[in-house]
Image (cartoon, grey):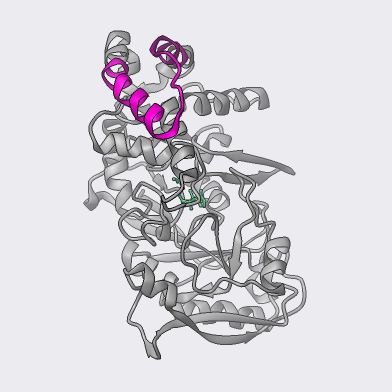
Amino acid sequence: MSVCVVVGMQWGDEGKGKIIDLLTEKADVVARYQGGHNAGHTIIFDGNKYILHLIPSGIFRPDKICVIGNGVVIDPAALSEEMQMLKDLGFDYEGRLLISDRANIILPYHRISDLHKEGASGSRKIGTTGRGIGPAYSDKIARVGLRTCDFLDESRLQETLRSNYEEKKKILKNLYGENLPELGEIVDQMLSHRDRFVKYICNTQSFLRDRIAEGKTILCEGAQGTMLDIDHGTYPFVTSSNSTAGGACTGLGIPPARIDRTLGVIKAYTTRVGEGPFPTELHDDYGEQLRNNGDEFGSTTGRPRRCGWFDAVVGKYAVELNGIDAVTLTKIDVLDQLDTIRVCTGYRHHGKIVDGLPASLPVLEQCEPVYTEYPGWQQSTSGIRCFDELPDHAKRYIDGLQDHLGVEIPLISTGPGREETILRGELL
Ligand code: IMP
């Protein structure tokens, strides 16, 4: 039995979907702790590809319980759509899907204001997914949000929406010239989705604590990645929640002392979508190769991802910040064709090596990466399941990453499928 947190170590899109899917086999419960439908978790099995945005990927395994925690922000339309997709595909989630009664709701005005803020002249463009995530979390912190428990009480739902409506209407009209739909229309929209998910709403904190007391294995699933964390990432180019391991405690109501293990997921190179500093970004043919070979296009928005070399400064920062016990390395096969591979082992700022990851955005933007070079292996690693079968230069690269991070890498992913995996140690 254990409680294990799975975190992304870069700017998201590390391949957490596959890793969580693999780990779920040994878990009883999978619980998502933050983010919203800005995330996209891709899972491939039996030759089919599935993308989930809100519901934990454990839903594809028939005996697993899936929890959407209080730290998640839920767009009722997106959740309904995802539930319908699972039904259409024949995956039954009755009795296996639990939604926290304390999760905040993404409302139509959140989405409108997200899109307009991004487009407004004079404001800094973050490159958000445009899903209303930031404005919904802002309302949560401002204590004016609508929560899932309000769906159990229609008059409370109406009252909360009414108390916010006039202010939101004025802001959208005056700032962006946008007309908010009538209050009644918003209430009706919310109520139209209510029937689909209201029966899954419950006190998931006590559910999880009871399962922990029974000795069950709980997998806490983070979305995005360490560098997009609101407190510890490349602020302000971050998402609006705590994607780091601590978010699992606040976003699920699990006491810190009950967390047994933290697993990091890191890609064999780096990507990011949206704006913001990215010291090892490549603007050349290598970057193009990584994007094309790795199919680096957003699973939520379809945007091309920015690509660059592996950044061990970022990796080490993620190890220390999250207290990572073991690392899972994904997409090693994407590097197969490269003649040379570089790893950033430090940053130089105005000629001096910087200690750790600078907080200041201008300083980070001016940092130059210091690289160590590795020879490429230029042969296929795709689908290899045994470490010894890897080309020597691939082994050298993986061992090098392990040394840079200072943490074991017991799992290496050599392709998107469940079976395309090298396991050389214990994970849970
Ligand atoms: P938001 O979360 O939509 O507000 O976007 C804030 C930043 O986080 C933007 O740079 C997005 O591209 C990025 N982001 C949000 N979700 C993901 C994700 O699942 N993968 C990668 N980047 C993400």
Q: Is residue 13 above or below residue 63?
A: below
| Magenta segment | 160-189
On whether residue 170 falls in the magenta region, the answer is: yes
Residue 379 visible somewhere in the drawing: yes
Give the residue at x 68% y 52%.
417
Q: Residue 255, how many percent across, how many down? A: 22, 46
Residue 170, placed above or below residue 233: above
Quadrant of res 168: top left
Residue in front for this viewpoint, 47 or 127:
127
Q: Position of residue 258 (x, y in %)?
A: 26, 49
Residue 269: give x, y in percent of width and height: 58, 69
Residue 352 shown left or right of residue 65 in the figure: left
Q: Along the horizontal axis of the image, is 54 left or right of 203?
A: right
Point 68% across, 67% down: residue: 290
Classify 396 as above or below 360.
below
Q: Which of these two is toward me, 198 or 389?
A: 198
Q: Residue 105, position in %: x, y?
A: 38, 28
* On screen, residue 340 above or below 71: below
Q: Quadrant of the C terminus?
A: bottom left
- Residue lying at 37% horizontally and 42% vertically, measured from the top left: 33
Could one spot residue 316 in this view of the protein? no
